[in-house]
Image (tube, rainbow, N blue to C red):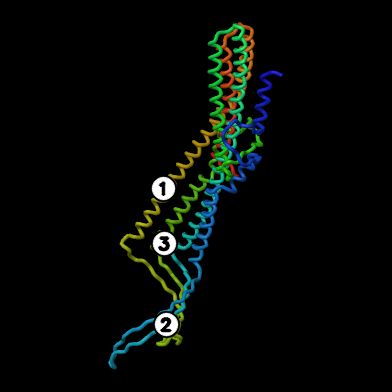
Amino acid sequence: MSKKYNWKKHLAVVLAGGIFTLASTSVWANAIDLTLEESINMALNNNKSIKISGTEVDSAKWAVEEAKGNKGFSLGYIHTDGRAKTSSSQGSVIGNSFKNQIKAQLPVYTGGALEGTINKAEIGAESAELSLENTKQQVKLDTTTAYFNILKTANLVQVGQESVNSLNGHLKNVNAQYAVGTVAKSDVLRSEVELADAQQNLIVYQNNYDLAMSNFNNIVGLELDTIVNISDKLQYTENDLSLEDSIAYALTHRPDGIMAEKNIAMAQEQLNVAKAGGRPNVYLGAEQSWLSDKFPGDDDNGWSVGVTTSWNVFDSNVTRSQIKQAEAAVMKTMEQEQQKKDAIQLEVRQAYLNMREAEKRIQTNQVSVEKAEEDFKIAQVRYSAGVGTNLDVIDAQVALTSARTNYIVSLYDYNTSKASLDKAMGVGI
């Protein structure tokens, strides 16, 4: 069985999610098998940012109920205990008074202030839902990136281990030839240095794997010492969307883009509320009262029903200033919406181009791995036959490790860029 086939077989096992035994000092207490979809669902259920956004949604919904309640019927009770001195022609009298009042009020017309407040609150509730969706999409991206990072670091450990094994085998060959006097001592020393360097790189790869695992656990809400057996593959899956279609989709579906539009509507409703300050207010009211000089004050004192109209005729330009502020706020939100659209288009373009760039690297790196494997095999044969140099073998091994690393990194970059593109487009959960 060829070396090329062996390496690809090992890589396929890792890509499929098999977790190898690490020569690491880390101690992992628990183990769990997870697919990418399961990981995302776990993160959505456990993430603190999502839970915070959920409470903001609840708060916004109650703000709507509050705004609607201000337009409805209200009933209040007032009890007053007093002691006063009164003077008359008969002299001064000091006495107690106990009064009870029940007041009812219903707004008839507020110049559009209450309606504007209700509309603004309803739009705010919609924005809160959009903010929650945006948070979920970000958590999905973070989880996906962390998931693929485990795969990438696991594969790099595998590449590092392959490099150590190859250099160790080569060192044995060099020592055997040195023992019979066919190669110089310098070949042994150089091979030992290269093996030590490969072992050091393997230690770094293993540590990166441990860190990637801990970071993933933190995102999805697992204990940090949990080891996750990855069930998916780090592989290439074609994305046939065009850049134009991606941008068009994003401008229609991005939650924060829709929120920018909602902000304009909220600012316009606030302008309506400000304009209501210059219009009359009409309230329907009723009152029943009881008054006596003995507690609790239960002598019927009468009742009244009436309509109250108030109009702020002059307030030293307070209302006008509020209107101007609200108009400026509308203009501000309109500019912010355009700014957000530009940012969305740029974000989509960056993610899309990064994805396409990684896609091209996957293709070239596949060829590089095949060529590097062939070159390394030839260098080993030539050295064993005495017609090649030790440096040829070492250079070929370095080139092979680099090609394998580049291939894995390009797969990781492609998959994470594709996930970033989904986030940039506003693809729903």
Q: Which mark is residue 332?
A: 1
State whether residue 294 is above or below residue 29: below
C-alpha gap between disc 3 and disc 1: 21 Å
Q: Which residue is mark 3?
A: 276
State whether residue 56 is above or below residue 410: below
Badge 1 crowding class, 10 Å Cα cut-off, few under 14, some 14 to 19, many 20 or more, is some
Can residue 237 be seen by looking at this rendering? no
Q: What's the amino acid at mark 2? A: Lys
C-alpha gap between disc 2 and disc 1: 52 Å
Percent coordinates x, y for residue 371 in the rendering: 62, 17
- Quarter of the N terminus within the rendering: top right
| Mark closer to the chain start, 2 or 1 | 2
State whether residue 16 is above or below residue 326: above
Discs 2/1, front: 2
Q: Which mark is residue 99?
A: 2
Assign a secondary structure to mark 3: helix
Assign a secondary structure to mark 1: helix
C-alpha gap between disc 3 and disc 2: 36 Å
Q: Residue at x 42, y 73 (%)?
A: 308
